[in-house]
Amino acid sequence: MRVPLSRIAHARSGDKGDGSNVGLIAATPALYEVIRREVTADRVKAHFAEVCHGAVERFEVPNLLALNFILHDSLGGGGTASLATDAQGKTHGQGLLQMTIDVPEEQLE
């Protein structure tokens, strides 16, 4: 079944300079394995194609059931250098939760 990440995980995000840092935390160990398989750096890069102009790095944090993504060149120069209305990474976590992935139905109960 295809579901938004918001149904199976939560997220936190922030920024450092021109990059944002997005943590994606699974609700259960089984769902961590699903997001580890489905939410790759390439998929996150494609999801944020309009705002992320640099590389996306992914780090696994299994003891927290989490993945951490660094989105380079994603804030128009950063909070102190950009004229953009919101040049902070705080909204990227909510943006990532809109991504949809395939999840086995038995994992959704």
Image (cartoon, rainbow, N blue to C red):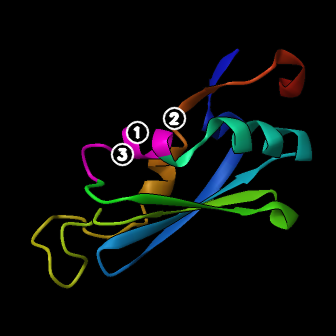
Point out the tag, 1 or 2, that comes first from the N-terminus.
1
In the image, what residue occupies the spot 61% across and 41% down?
Answer: 39
Query: Which dot marks residue 48?
Result: 3
| Mark 3 to mark 2 CA distance (whole Å) | 10 Å
* Magenta region: 42-51
In this rendering, the count of numbered labels is 3
Kindly indicate whether the residue at mark 2 contacts the one at mark 1 (C-beta within 8 angstroms): yes
Mark 1: amino acid? His
Residue 64 sits above or below residue 26 on the image:
below
The x and y percentages for residue 91 are 41, 58
| Mark 3 to mark 1 CA distance (whole Å) | 4 Å
- Is 99 left or right of 76, judged from the image as shown? right
**Does the magenta-highlighted stretch encompass residue 41?**
no
The x and y percentages for residue 88 are 33, 70
In the image, what residue occupies the spot 72% across and 45% down?
Answer: 36
Residue 70 sits above or below residue 1 on the image:
below
Check disc 2 and report the residue beneath it: 99
In the image, what residue occupies the spot 24% across and 44% down?
Answer: 50
In the image, what residue occupies the spot 39% across and 67% down?
Answer: 89
Mark 1 vs mark 2: give the one in front: 1
- Is 6 left or right of 107, judged from the image as shown? left
Residue 105 sits above or below residue 66 on the image:
above
Quadrant of the rendered image containing residue 101: top right
Kindly indicate whether the residue at mark 1 contacts the one at mark 3 (C-beta within 8 angstroms): yes
Q: Residues within 10 Å of mark 3 (few under 14, many from 20)?
A: some
Check disc 1 and report the residue beneath it: 47
Q: Nearer the viewer, residue 63 or 96?
A: 63
Q: Secondary structure at mark 3?
A: loop
